[in-house]
Each structure stands twice: as structure tokens, then as C-alpha cells.
Image: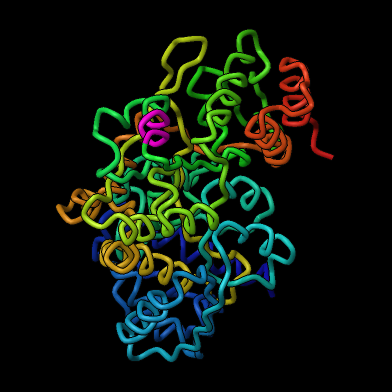
Amino acid sequence: MKKKLLASLLTVSMVAAMLTGCGGSKEEAPANTTETTEAAGGAESTDAAESTDAADPVANLIAATTDTVALTVWASEEDQTLTTELLEKFKAQYPDVTFDIKLGSESESTAKDTILADVEAAADVFAFADDQINELVAAGALQPVSATYTYDVAGENVAGAVEAATVNGTLYAYPMTADNGYFMFYDASVFTEDDVQSLEKMIEVAGAAGKKVAMDISNGWYIYSFFQGAGYDLTLNDDGVTNSCSWNAAGATDVAQAIIDLCGTGVLVDLGDEEMATAIAEGTVVAAVNGTWRAETASDAWGENYAATKLPTFEVAEEAKQMSSYSGYKLIGVNPYSANVGWSMLLAEYLTNADSQAARFEARGLGPANSTVAASSAVQENPAIAALAAQAAYATPQRVGGNFWTPAETLGQILASGNPDGTDLQTLLDTAVEGITAPVQ
């Protein structure tokens, strides 16, 4: 049954893709005019297919649908309200089709683990963070974007987002946001624009005010900014699962010492996301490295003094180095085992089209991947999104194997706490790199 379904889907997808690429001339034959198919939500009759317009893949999809279209969608807990609204609008757009769409809650950060536990039982349409795409593709858990129904996914989204959704030249997902990175929030009543160019200066100013600067240093995602900024690379190998890392190369101990010294001031504090939000709200923290999801927290706390900018420089052996960061995107994927792959692809398009991305920005302040929406004045005037754009020049895509996270977290904890055991820094870095580059068992 699955082989028959997927074979039928490929027929639909290839024709739809051909029509999109060629402009769908009237002389071309409509999709599936000569055989019955079970793809896209139900048995399609030859008569129904012949009555459709070959230039309109959506009309073909509707004509091919005779049964209720049952779909399961996973979105993050924070995105439930907006996704519910979008799903209702999607259903209203196709009044001649009966839908049974169930919405579940699944964090973009944990989607991969849940999906790979049982791909066939996972949602038809789901959101996930772009760093998970290699493992999802390797497991056969993502349907390639082999057909377009309503807009050109690759053409209408920013290049970085399209790259993040692509593996080995094949587009596997639909860009949803372009804001899964980090930058510096700050209270402009405490810091000037010149102050926030240097982390050392920020620590000096915050310390004089009896306040703190926060960063989740005990987290591989953030500690990366110091080593990469100083020129020490971390890359994913061609096997897609193991890492190469130069964090223990000559001179890297100066980076480790810089982190120890910065945290040793007592002004730069190592706080996780929730702790950081509480400290900002309470007024203890007046600057923080974080992402757009904390924009509202900072705005509520600092009011008209809420500001954001790229990450600052920090000193390594008395030389200023620009802190780097990971660029990140949130994507929507389609499960190739869906009983309604065509409708799943159309729904994925709808949830990530320009209007939906604009609605997501308006509702949650999340940065759009759609080029037109990203260029709008409303988006450009948003401090957090503008800061991300400024940081983009110093950001790299997050592509690391799973063995990176635990050793990097351990390294961050040791450095942020001042290396209390007095371990030789080269030994400390060698141990971390050994774990980061370890073979995957």
C-alpha cells in the first residue's frame, strides 16, 4: 500500500513540478488522466482528473480527493494559537473538501527525536529547527519539495533559509522563520551604542551600575561564539554525523582564559534561558545574549529603553575579536509516509507563505524567511530582527553532529565557574575536543 501510494505521489509530484517549471501550457496533459491513484486524500477517477486544468495543480489535487482529508500537524506550544487560526483559514479556502486536521504540540527543538522514534506514526506536517534536517533526511523522514502548488518556495525565501532547508542539492523543507539565532539585548538607559561594541566595556558599565550582563555560557550553542569568533572552527564532517574541531589548536587556550576572566568579574553571569528571563524582569540583568523569543521579556522590562544590536567584541590576548554566532531557521517538513502527501505539501506551503509569515511576525515577533516580508518596514523597524540582520555577517549555519553538545556544555560550565579544579587549559580543551570529535557509536 505504501509503495503504491508513494509511486502515485511521485507521478503527481513530477507532473506538478513540470507544470510549475514550464508554465503549464494548455497543450500539456493534466496529471493522472489515464490511471486511478490513491494519492492526495482519496481515490481519483479518470473522469474527475480529465475535468481539471493541467496548469492548476491545486485544482487537480481537489479533483483527486473523494474522501475526508485527515492530517495531523505539530507546532510548538507557543505557536498553537496562531497555527489554529491558520488551519481554519486554510480549510475555509477549500470549502469543497472535507478536512479532519488535528493539531498537536511539539517543540521545534525536540521534533527530530520524537519523529525518529517512529516516523510512520509522526505528524503529516511538522515544524523543526534547521539543524535537525540532516538526520531527518538520512532517516527518510522528510518528503522532498518536489512540487509547488501556490508559490515558488526556493524563489520567495531568503537564500540562507533555502540553504538551510536543502541537503545535497535537494530542497526538503519549507522555511518558516529566519530568526533562530542570537544577539545582544540591552537597556539603553544603562549603555550607550558605543558601550555595547565591546563586552569588556559592557561589563565595566554594568558593574558600575550594580547590574549584570547574562549569557548561557554552559551551552554549546552560545560558547561557540567565543571560539568561532577567535578563528577556531567547528564543522560537520561529510558523513553528516561526526565533527571536526580546532578548539584545542595553538592559541585556543587564550580563548578559554578570556572566558574565565570575563566570568571572573562577577558581572558576566552564566544563566539559562528561564533564569535569564526572570533576572531581566526583576531588573538584575540589563543586557543579555539571547534570541527573538526573549524580545517581549526585554521590551516589557526596559520599555522605551529596550534596544538590541549585534554581539560585541571580546579580547583574546589583548586583541579584540568579534563574537560569532549560529544562524538558525525554523522549517516545516512533510512526512513522506503521510496518507495525504499532496495535501500535506499544500498545507506546508500555506503555513509558510508570505501572509502566514507576516502573521507570525505580527503575532509573535518572529523574523520571516520570506524575502518580501523580511524587507517590509514593520520588520525592519523591529530592534531584535534588525540586530539579527547586523549579526548575520558574523554568523554561520548550525551544522554539528550530536557528540558536540555534552562536551561543549561541560567545557562551558568549567570555564564559567572559573576552572575550579585548576585543570591545565590545554588538557581541558583536548578533552573537550576528544569528545566533540568522537566517532558515533
Residue 122 percent across, percent down from the top left: 65, 70
Residue 36 percent across, percent down from the top left: 53, 79
The residue drawn where x is 40% and y is 54% is 283
State the residue in front, 217 or 16. Answer: 217
Q: Is residue 362 visible?
A: yes
The residue drawn where x is 32% and y is 78% is 52
Q: Is residue 19 visible?
A: no
The residue drawn where x is 56% and y is 74% is 105
Q: In this image, 416 relative to 434: left or right?
A: left
State the residue in front, 117 or 225. Answer: 225
Q: In this image, 392 relative to 315: left or right?
A: left
State the residue in front, 85 or 59. Answer: 85
Q: Main SS of the magenta segment?
A: helix
Q: Quadrant of the N terminus?
A: bottom right
Residue 268 percent across, percent down from the top left: 50, 35
Q: In this image, 40 relative to 94: left or right?
A: right
Q: Quadrant of the C terminus?
A: top right
Furthest toward the left, the residue is 377
Q: Which residues are magenta?
A: 202-208
Verify whether residue 229 appears in magenta.
Answer: no
**Which quarter of the picture shows residue 213?**
top left
